[in-house]
Amino acid sequence: MPGKIEDYALIGDLQSAALVGRDGSIDWLCLPRFDSTACFAALLGDESAGHWRIAPAGAQTATSRRYRDDTLVLETEWRTPDGVVRVADFMPPRGEAADVVRIVEGIEGEVAMRTDLVLRLDYGRVVPWVRRQGPDLAAIAGPDAVWLRTDVRLHGSDRKTVGDFTVRAGEKVPFVLTHQLSHLPRPRPTDPFEALAGTQRFWRDWIGRSDYDGRWPHEVRRSLLLLKALTYAPTGGILAAATTSLPEQLGGPRNWDYRFCWLRDATFTLQALLGTGYVAEAKAWREWLLRAVAGDPADLQIMYGLDGTRRLPEYTLDWLGGYHGSAPVRAGNAAAGQLQLDVWGEVLDGLHLAREAGIATTDAAWDLQRALLDFLEGNWQQPDNSLWEVRGDRRQFVHSKVMAWAGFDRAVTAVERHGLDGPVERWRAVRDEIHAEVCAKGFDDGRNTFTQSYGSAALDAATLLIPRVGFLPGTDPRVVGTVEAVQRELSQDGFLLRYRPEHDNVDGLPGGEGVFLACTFWLVDALHAIGREDEAEQLFERLLGLRNDVGLLSEEYDPAAGRQLGNTPQAFSLVGLVNSARLLSGTATRTSADAGAQRTRRG
């Protein structure tokens, strides 16, 4: 049985990532990419689906763990009756091939150790052919080849590779697991200690570029490091999360593959990166975006593969029982084909943010934006599936309309402030038409709140973004009323649900889910916007308390059980932390969205 979601820490090399449990077991690793099949998939089943554990013989949970300074080098420590031992786990920035390095170090006394390696390719389904190759262990199956180099004597036992060894104070025992495509030559061996020095240097240099000088510096830096770890370096794409099928409700079916690049999530990430000094990452994301969405604007998807791939077919891995019995386990994501009109606005807003940060607009980028606006002008009145990717009937979701408004608002700003060419009067007219319709059809006068969709009594946490995007200012009574209504009706123990799934069966799925962490960060921002700053800060501090011991946040949280839920680490949650910290610290700069809030009072 895998550990709790919050029991896992992340290591990664900007092309893939592994989850390491408190017991010293790597229970999730996909190679060579984040979205490749897993060679360790015990996270979604049991140990027979693949894992790699190094720990004191007979020991269970470690005594303590931490990341080494501002790096992604994980240190796990056990204190036993015979001594103290520490394991350093990391993935060096990708060179010739993917490496996972584990260095066992004796701190005190003499500790008997054990390593158990169960390598199972294709999400636990394929047992590789394992043989000796010189001093190393070599495994191969289909497209995958793996080598394990160590001085520890290893042997096979019941279809796994095991080794027993002793480490004494001052000794260091390294293990290096290397993956390569099986048709390619074996990569040159990696020196584990040189790799450790290089990995530490890489992460320290990267975080040293941050210009964040606000409050909660440690929490913000750790979140930025994890966000960077979710970036696919070859293309600049930003993942939603490193995992698939961690459930939104234990035992339930709401289990999705998040190892792709959502345009919406990436735009929020862009805000956090630009706001903390990472312009190079913002440029790389913009170039990824322009490549991914090139073509007919009508074909814009809500998500793409790491390299901009459009086809992300969804299928189930029925041989895996699911995390703590939460089935099915899915690979791919059928939501890629949904109509979510807010994404057009999110893309236009993201490119607007890049302009505001001084990233020059190319003719090709502006031509693309004009094409997106042309599509949005002819389709903003259509019902859609909303940002929540509901699998029920399409509706006239308020947030989708608000983001359509934002798209035209940013286009008007591009002409007026940046001198770009376009039919600004027409865009201004469409912007005003959308604004008037949303205020007329998406607002419940009797309850003084915006609703989830036209004519519905249901509420939606996404309406908390209305002041953030500049649709209305935080001082507007309608915004105040919406914040209060959402907080009252969607709150569980002070944290927010996205919406009530049982209301009108809006998402077409059985079961429920936990509170959504990104939405609760939006509540922090909204409370600040309406002047309830002390309450906003108190809620932010509570959210910080939900992080695990090394700073990870998943997508959701179960207040009753006190457990994280959903895929992890979740970019949407980490971005919420960074952006709320910037806001509460007074380091969030004024944007044209804020200016839009000052301009727009109609409706």
Image (cartoon, rainbow, N blue to C red):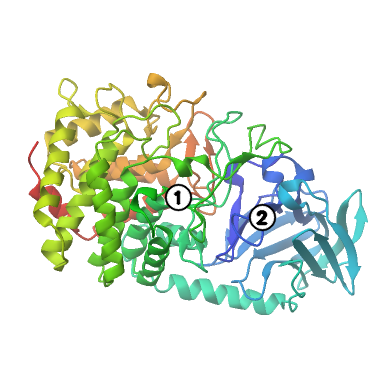
Please tell me which residue is depicted at 47% across the width and 40% down the height of the picture.
335
Please tell me which residue is depicted at 53% across the width and 75% down the height of the picture.
202
Q: Position of residue 182 (x, y in %)?
A: 76, 66
Please tell me which residue is depicted at 68% across the width and 52% down the height of the picture.
38
Taking 82 as reference, is 224 left or right? left
The residue to which callout 1 is attached is 303
Furthest residue in direction front, as rendered = 296
Assign the C terminus to one quadrant of the image: top left
Residue 456, above or below 466: above
Taking 600 as reference, is 183 left or right? right
Q: Nearer the viewer, residue 396 or 297?
A: 297
Q: In terms of image quadrants, where is residue 532?
A: top left
Assign the N terminus to one quadrant of the image: top right
Residue 310, above or below 5: below
Q: Amino acid at mark 2?
A: Leu
Q: Amino acid at mark 1?
A: Met
Q: Secondary structure at mark 2?
A: strand
Residue 153, visible in the rendered structure: no
Q: Residue 29, labelled with which disc?
A: 2
Q: Nearer the viewer, residue 84 or 408?
A: 408
Q: From the viewer's perspective, is the residue at label 2 or at label 1 nearer?
A: 1
Residue 29, above or below 253: below
Q: Position of residue 163 (x, y in %)?
A: 87, 59
Q: In terms of image quadrants, where is residue 517?
A: top left
Q: In terms of image quadrants, where is residue 34?
A: bottom right
> Which of the marked residues, 2 or 1, is nearer the chain's N terminus?
2
Q: Position of residue 41 (x, y in %)?
A: 70, 47
Residue 249, visible in the rendered structure: yes
Q: Secondary structure at mark 1?
A: strand
At label 2, counting other C-alpha atoms closer than 10 Å, the crowd grade (few under 14, some 14-19, many 20 or more) is: many
